Amino acid sequence: MLKKILAGSGSSSLHSRWRTITNRCSSTTTSVSSAVNSMLLRSLKEHYLEISKIEPPPKINPPNSFSVVKGAFESTGPVLKRDYDAIGIHSVSLTPKTQASQFLAAPNKYAGPTFQDLDQKMRDTLHGYIEERGINESLFCFLQSWLYVKDHRNGLKWFKAVGSFITKPKTAQDVPQ
């Protein structure tokens, strides 16, 4: 049947029919695409406005013994520093770095018992050790507040980035062939 259509019609007639079909498909695809983009943008804007109205928690400063490293809020996580009057080194060992990264390789040696397997006196001593270094409830309150604010900011940035991606003009490279 296709041979009859091709044989019976001139090449200019066939070309004009093909152009009409592709133009209809192209205009339909464009209108559907713009409708979807419009729906996405409306939904993104609603969510963005809803998130931007959320009150952040009250500002909590880190515990007195810690200070926030400048610019740390924009990094991958909170970075705190603390000064110590003295530090004792009881042993030193060499640990190779992994080939793929600059991180130290995990040791192959026995790392000791799990915390739960230690007797109560040893667990209490370790708790005291970390609390002396400022790792306590006030530090966790600060970290919780900090991470909430960071997550809130990242959410707003994400909504803006997706909205910008949807509204940016499409180039020939963006359209699948």
Image (cartoon, rainbow, N blue to C red):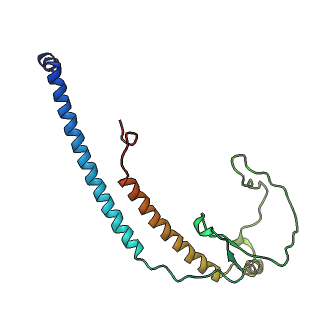
* Residue 10 lies in quadrant: top left
133, above or below 28, in the image: below
Q: Residue at the spot x=57%, y=75% of the render? A: 146
125, above or below 177, in the image: below
1, above or below 93, in the image: above
Q: Residue at the spot x=19%, y=39% of the render? A: 24
* Residue 159 lies in quadrant: bottom left
Give 170 or 99, whichever is nearer the viewer: 170
User: Looking at the picture, how far across and down is residue 171, in whole percent?
Assistant: 38, 43
Position of 12 with respect to 89 (left or right) is left
| Quadrant position of the N terminus in the picture | top left
| Quadrant position of the C terminus in the picture | top left
Q: Residue at the spot x=59%, y=69% of the render? A: 73
Position of 172 with respect to 86 (left or right) is left
Give 65 or 15, whichever is nearer the viewer: 15
Name the outermost residue toward the top: 7
* Residue 144 lies in quadrant: bottom right
> Total number of numbered labels?
0
User: Looking at the picture, how far across and down is residue 138, in whole percent?
Assistant: 64, 83
User: Looking at the picture, how far across and down is residue 22, in whole percent?
Assistant: 22, 34
Position of 55 with respect to 90 (left or right) is left
Q: Residue at the spot x=44%, y=58% of the render? A: 161
User: Looking at the picture, how far across and down is residue 98, in whole percent?
Assistant: 73, 49
